[in-house]
Image (cartoon, helix red, strand yellow):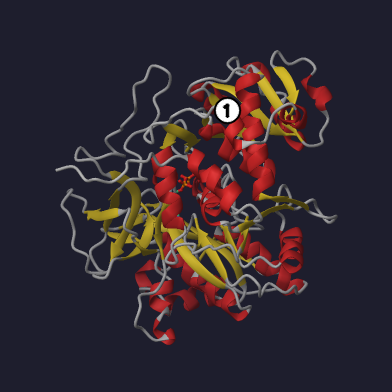
Amino acid sequence: MLSTMQDVPLTVTRILRHGMTIHAKSRIVTWTGGGEPRRRTFAQAGGRAVQLAAALRGELGVTDDERVATLMWNNAEHVEAYLAVPAMGAILHTLNLRLPSEQLIYIANHAEDRVIIVDGSLLPLLAPLLPHLPTVEHVVVSGPGDRSVLEEADAQVHDYEELLAGQSPDFDAFDWPDLDERAAAAMCYTSGTTGDPKGVVFSHRSIYLHSMQANTTEALGLTERDLTLVVVPQFHVNAWGVPHATFMVGANMLMPDRFLQPAPLADMIERERPTHAAAVPTIWQGLLAEVTERPRDLSSMARVTIGGSACPPALMEAYDKLGVRLLHAWGMTETSPLGTTSDPPGGIAAEDEWPYRITQGRFPIGIEARLAGPDGSILPWDSASAGELEVRGPWVARAYYGGSDGKELAPEDKFSEDGWLRTGDVGVISPDGYLTLTDRAKDVIKSGGEWISSVGLENALMGHPAVAEAAVVAVPDDKWGERPLATVVLKAGAAVGYPELRDFLASRVAKWQVPERWATVASVPKTSVGKFDKKVIRRQYANGELDVTRL
Ligand code: ADP
């Protein structure tokens, strides 16, 4: 028997209409670097999204599921594109502005972007790419910037504000398409640490359900009373879903635009007093160093969602002292990205929360998980059996975008035959469903017959008062196959000998795991989304570029 309930498609169009009407007064605040920030209500931003949709269709002729790319910082206009493009039936493709040119060219061509909306400040980045992007017919420029660099471009150049000006902001004035909730809404490419980048295509339904999950109190828990500082870039897995989630509940957004350095971040927190924020650990490391040197009041930020790579427990402790609670989350492009969040279980005392907070967290209703052992057998959730994490659920990818020939890519090392995503992350799960990741499969150190967790060594090292950052990688070793190499960045003015660091580690991890090879570096190399770039460290070691001491 079928139910008697209505079957309403879960679409971004509904998110747009809901946010701009029910939460009309909520705001998007865009930082301008010291002067008065730009402030726009959801009613205004939503109206402008309607105008953008109308202009894309009426002026630029965007139809069906054509790709409209963005090359933008986090700002109000980028949020407008987030809403307008999927709602009008096209596909939003966020381009990662930190990728090397050849990868950006590969990605834009693979997705066959027809339009690129670009921040004026990023024109010097886009202009040299354009001759290599034959599918791009229109470039829409938002905000100030030197447009003369586009004079030679084959694509037609438009001004964002002029395009909008000719259109009605009235939601009902536009003929919105009837969308299948399973239709593509947005796409994002993985950073391609191995092989070419791969496209993940999110559906309206997956975005809608993921946003609802993001808004639960066990995840981001945002309400209309919140102001969330969205540091995680909108080109990094849709800013972890925050812009769509906020439009559902009316949470206000603080957008840093291009002012992502620790000093302006500290200034905007002190001045605008956000209640929540989201970013990767390296951002919070940088901000901590900044406010240690020049104190600012961060205490408005009661909760911070931190993920993208493992959060060192020492970082959590440091922020606890500033009145800021870091909440660990795990996810990946293929999981939209929220996969776990580390809200401690109910019914435990505050002093017993710590062991839960330092895990990657618990799986929400939308994510089913299992651990696969080296032989493929499914392992128990006993906090001890380590295996590769596999997940499935309504906001988890089942394949990669194959290009215009319609063939999807489902490499066997990423997707199991019975429909699970192989994450490439190794860890254990407790009987009550908390995930602790020990490593990425490709970063684990295989020493003799045993595995050493690079993250475990890093977290322990970053607990030493002289250490600002530590990255540990596997290096070849004649006797053991592989051994750990520890690279450390010392805090400003700190001095410490390697023997002291070795003894410090030996008191925290098994003795045979303690590295013999040590190097001090000025900074740890980072990927385009701010994670430790371990393949660069391995290459530096292989090329003899590191000053390594052997103890
Ligand atoms: P990539 O880093 O490959 O560019 P993603 O942003 O999709 O792409 O990264 C996903 C990966 O980041 C996960 O598979 C995992 O290895 C790592 N990761 C994300 N969050 C965490 C976390 N909280 N702790 C440890 N690792 C994490």
Q: Please name the residue shown 60% across and 14% down the image.
A: 134
Looking at this view, name the residue that lies furthest to the right. 35
Q: Helix, strand or loop at disc 1?
A: strand
Q: x, y (%) of residue 504? A: 49, 78
In the picture, residue 108 is in which quadrant? top right
Q: x, y (%) of residue 96? A: 59, 38
Q: Please name the residue shown 47% across and 39% down the image.
A: 190
Q: Nearer the viewer, residue 286 or 342?
A: 342
Q: x, y (%) of residue 87? A: 52, 34
Q: x, y (%) of residue 373? A: 21, 53
Asked if 37 appears above or below 276 in the picture, the reply is: above
The residue that disc 1 covers is 68
Numbered circles on residues, count: 1
Q: Nearer the viewer, residue 60 or 503?
A: 60
In the picture, residue 57 is in which quadrant? top right
Q: Does 393 sit left or right of 72 as displayed?
A: left
In the picture, residue 381 is in which quadrant? bottom left
> As shown in the figure, which amino acid type bears the numbered disc 1?
Val
Q: Nearer the viewer, residue 479 or 530?
A: 530
Crowdedness of circle 1 by 10 Å Cα count: few (<14), some, many (20+)?
many
State yes or no: Cβ of the residue under disc 1 lies below 8 Å from any atom of ligand 1.
no
Q: Please name the residue shown 57% across and 59% down the image.
A: 278
Q: Does 353 sit left or right of 378 as displayed?
A: right
Q: Does 348 sit left or right of 537 as displayed?
A: left
Q: Quadrant of the N terminus?
A: top left
Residue 419 visible to the viewer: yes
Q: Please name the residue shown 55% across and 43% down the image.
A: 16
Residue 97 visible to the viewer: no
